[in-house]
């Protein structure tokens, strides 16, 4: 394959109380009451107009502290290695993260968020509104995760807090 560069310029930075990856919730579903904010660079503030009408947003960001890429990883919920593209592990060939977080409010170029599972200082690449009309999919398959049954263990391990969320 021909090597062609793709370059992105961050539109802002994500702020959170998470400073250590090993103590950060695995996904937004495990990050209840984990407040944070997206500080958008002033030149992009106008692009936020109308966003305050949405309850949730997708954040796409650069996993700036991810380790080297790995094609097989052991997911936090399973002891069997999977292909990295069948997981949400950060050690991807392109270190791009995706989270759906709750939009609490907008103050100018700052978005106040909840359910933030992102490390403090993470470069923000893009924001998209979550729209149930287009994004909700019924009757999905969830691959290897369909075999997971211990909800209490999933909550404990996912929140990375003793006793779960």
Image: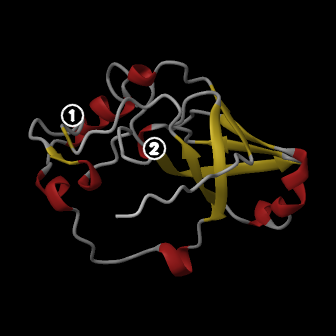
Name the spot of residue 102 as percent of width and height, x first. Answer: 61, 51
Taking 31 as reference, is 50 above or below it? below
- Are discs 1 and 2 less than 8 Å apart at CB? no
> Label 1 to label 2, Cα distance in Å?
28 Å
Which disc is residue 40 wearing?
none
Residue carrying label 1: 153
The residue carrying mark 2 is 95
Which residue does the image show at 39% across and 39% down from the upper left?
A: 90
Q: Residues within 10 Å of mark 2 (few under 14, many from 20)?
A: some
Residue at (19%, 53%) from the top-left corner? 145
Residue 21: x %, y % from top left: 44, 24
Q: At 44% from the left edge and 58% from the top edge, which residue is drawn?
A: 3
Tally of numbered discs: 2
Upstream in sequence: badge 1 or badge 2 = 2
Q: Is residue 95 left or right of residue 133?
A: left
SS type, badge 1: helix
Q: Can you say which quadrant of the picture contains the C terminus?
A: top left
- Looking at the image, which residue is at 59% across and 66% down? 130
């Amino acid at each position: 394959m021909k090597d062609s560069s793709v370059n992105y310029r961050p539109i802002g930075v994500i702020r959170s109380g998470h400073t250590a990856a090993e103590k950060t919730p695995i996904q937004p579903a495990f990050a209840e009451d984990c407040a944070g904010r997206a500080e958008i660079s002033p030149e992009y503030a106008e692009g936020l107009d109308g966003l305050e009408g949405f309850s949730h947003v997708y954040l796409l960001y650069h996993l700036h502290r991810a380790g080297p890429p790995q094609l097989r990883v052991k997911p936090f919920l399973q002891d069997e290695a999977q292909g990295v593209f069948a997981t949400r592990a950060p050690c991807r060939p392109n270190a791009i993260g995706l989270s759906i977080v709750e939009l609490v409010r907008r103050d100018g170029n700052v978005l106040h968020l909840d359910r933030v599972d992102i490390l403090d200082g993470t470069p923000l690449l893009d924001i998209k509104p979550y729209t149930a009309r287009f994004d909700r999919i019924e009757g999905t398959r969830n691959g290897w995760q369909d075999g997971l049954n211990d909800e209490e263990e999933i909550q404990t391990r996912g929140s990375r807090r003793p006793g779960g969320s």
